[in-house]
Amino acid sequence: MAQIFHRSTNFISRLSIYGAVVIIGALGYALYAIAMSPWYTDQNVKRQQPVPFSHRHHAGELGIDCRYCHTSVEKSSFAGVPPTQTCMTCHSQIWTNASMLEPVRASYRDDKSIEWIRVNALPDFVYFDHSIHVAKGVGCTTCHGQIAEMPLTERAGTLYMSWCLECHRQPEKYVRPKSEVFNPYYEPPSAGEQLKMGKKLVAEYNIKSLQTCSTCHR
Amino acid sequence: MEYSKLRTDLIPGVFGARGNTRSARSLARGVTVACLGTVALLLFGCRLDMHVQPKYLPYEPTDFFADGRSERQPVPGTVARGQLRLDELMFTGRENGVVVDKFPFPITRADLDRGRERYNVYCTPCHDYTGTGRGMIVQRGFPQPPSYHIQRLRDAPAGHFYEVMTNGFGAMYSYAARVEPADRWRIAAYIRVLQLARNSKIDDVPESERGKLTQQSAQQPSGQSMGQSR
């Protein structure tokens, strides 16, 4: 019986084998790239807020402490957005005619909540707690980035599980002295110094490396 | 509308509608990706049940109540456990209706440190670190508060500072929602420290510590008072 395939098709069969490897690899890479892209993770994407609130202005230039507005961050799982009254402690007297602050005044006048657009959000099956991180020397900027430089707030990390675990596996790479937790301009020392200081702080603050699933999925 | 009127009720902020959270939005995008990737099978496995659970997290909006807040105010007159406020001095700064110069608990070094920390967070934007009333917000046009070092405020009873923080004073809003009663007393104690630091004489320093001070002032050019050394 004559051969079904001509000799020249050997090339096509080899090409399709290697081609399949390449295509599957490329597809895998494309999916990974999409999963890590800001389009999917929202990392570094600015959100338009009802009031163009600027951390650069308030936390940076004016030097207002995070806790002045995010009052509950040391005591509870959530940091919270400030109530309208907090804005009005200052804006009842300054910039009282600015039209960009009209939603704040309207909220105060009509007893209506300002609806902020959420920037950082975890799925509901994840448990996260601010107070423990703040109490153990993890600074706001470690997770939220250079917030004092942001005219509009954006997300600084992917908030993937791998992102959390990166630190939970080796907290010594990220911890800082407790006195610097709220400092938006804190600069970590060079990698070697950080490890030395980190090991000391991990021992001093008794920081555990929490990796069991029930830490975050409870 | 007159905004300087003090309001004690808070208007909480909320986070806007659910569609804005990453979980829902990005999952929708994930579905698109899955389609594009021709892995149509995955689509059948994609459900949002666990990402968006039927429960309210703090600050989540609701359409069930007219004001859109899932956090409800307690019925007026409700007293939560541990929140019964019978101690007049602790919660009003008064005894028998009179403002008194007393603290409801003994002030220790730890209380003063806590007081300084709280003061630096909540008061320095206007009153500045030494209490002269030239904070950053005042430099940007906020009415200037009086210095803590004027005679009237040096003579003022501790309860007065507590009252100002609790109820607000003139252009200054109440800090009751942000600073707990015990911390308000600690701030009041720290204001006393600031006042003392501005008006102390070398005789006030224990004999054993004086050496250090004279050393320090030798290093500083002119005879600055202790209060300014911050």
Image (cartoon, coloured by chain):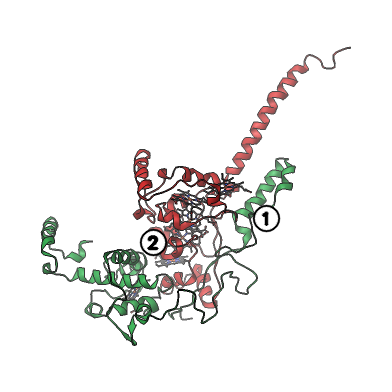
Query: Where does label 2 land, which residue?
Result: A65
Residue A151: tell me if it is visible. no
How far across and how far down the image is residue A72, in percent? Answer: 45, 64
Callout 1: 10 Å neighbours few (<14), some, many (20+)? few
**Residue placed under numbered mark 1 in the picture:** B49
**Residue at image point 26% right, 74% down:** B148
- For the residue marked with disc 1, what is the amino acid? Asp
Closer to the observer: label 2 or label 1?
Answer: 1
Q: Chain of mark 1?
A: B
Chain A rendered in what hue?
A: red
- Pinpoint residue B120: horizontal percent, then vertical percent: 33, 64
x then y, percent, for residue B201? 13, 69
Quarter of the picture containing the C terminus of chain A is bottom right
Real-space Cα separation, disc 2 to disc 1, in angstroms: 38 Å
- Establish if A31 lies above or below A132: above
Residue in the image at 60% along x and 43% along y: A35
Q: Is residue B195 visible?
A: yes
The lab-note entry on whether marks 2 and 1 share a chain reads no
Residue B29 as seen in the image, left or right of residue B131: right
Shown colour of chain B: green
Q: Which label belongs to residue B208?
A: none
Does residue A214 appear left or right of residue A141 in this picture?
A: right
Q: Horizontal and vertical percent for residue B180?
A: 40, 71
Residue at image position (55%, 77%) is: A110
Disc 2: CA contacts within 10 A as few (<14), some (14-19) or many (>=20) = many
Asked if B182 appears above or below A130 in the picture, the reply is below
Quarter of the image where one finds residue B20? bottom right
Q: How many marks?
A: 2
SS at circle 1:
loop
